[in-house]
Image (cartoon, rainbow, N blue to C red):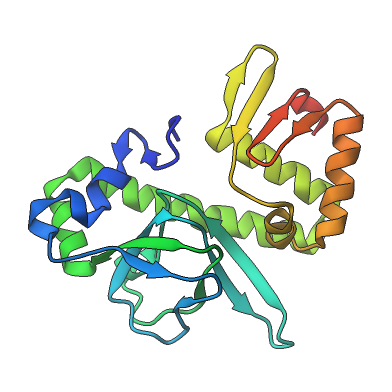
Amino acid sequence: MSNSIWCFENVNLFRILCPHRLKEYQKDHFEGFKKGDVIYFPDDASKSIFMVSKGKVKIVSYSEEGEEIVKAILGKGEIFGEKALLGEEKRDDYAVACTEPTELCPMKLPDMYTLMRENEKFGLSIYKLIGLRIKKMERRFEALLHKDVKTRLCEFLKEMADENGIESGSEVIVNHFLTQKDFADLIGTKRETVTRLFNELKQDGVINYSRKEIRIREMENL
């Protein structure tokens, strides 16, 4: 990832996928959602992919016991619904708006395939993004089964640093849009536990945390 969250391997997904920036897609438009609105349900037809233009979207499923499982929380410039590109005919999870307003750029599959054919580097980057997201999900589920909460949080912070971190002297700075509730949902614990663990890491001098930025001072101690 580059410094801009919506740039993947130097391919500006935000510029390419936002329909209002391309004359041939002027018929398309932003779709607006309120907090809690469901963007799609399981078994809905997979006809489009989406890019977040404003706000946040979470991708969730539910266990047989009705427990919510948060698979991802996505912000500006990130895409979702991308499994449609791999031949998925129906959605297998929920996409829900987390903030108000949340605005999305929709892109129908035929239009997406056209863009990928016309820009080989863009197409390869999309498929690489899908592969990395699948691997990330596998690691997260493995951690939920076999690792304690602190280890899961530390590994998640390392993952964020690897993907989006910016070195500044002896620190690694990670800009983020996640709340402590978001962190808790993503690592499978309670918000109070995340608050306690962040405070412990801060007191130990490992990190410094704010609503928009995490400064990791000692990567080796995470």
User: How far across and how far down the image is residue 32, in percent?
Assistant: 38, 68
- Residue at horizontal 32 percent and vertical 33 percent from the top: 10
Name the image quarter holding residue 161. Answer: top right
Task: Judge whether residue 148 can be spotted in this image.
Answer: no
* Residue 33: x %, y % from top left: 43, 70
Tell me if 40 is positioned left or right of 197 in this view: left
Location of residue 169 (image quadrant) = top right
Residue at the outermost left position: 24
Where in the figure is residue 189, as x and y percent of width and height? 80, 62
- Residue 78 in percent (x, y) is at 42, 52
All told, the count of numbered labels is 0
Residue 105 appears in the rendering: yes
Viewer-side residue, 94 vs 32: 32
Q: Please report the residue visible at 30 percent of the width from the left and 65 percent of the height from the top.
A: 85
**Image quadrant containing the N terminus:** top left
| 28 lies above or below 209 | below
Rendered position, 71 above or below 37? above
Q: Going by the image, does 78 lie left or right of 87?
A: right
The correct choice, above or below, for 197 with respect to 51 in the image is: above
Quadrant into which the C terminus falls: top right
Q: In this orientation, which residue lies closer to the viewer: 96 or 10?
A: 96
Q: Is residue 41 left or right of residue 23?
A: right
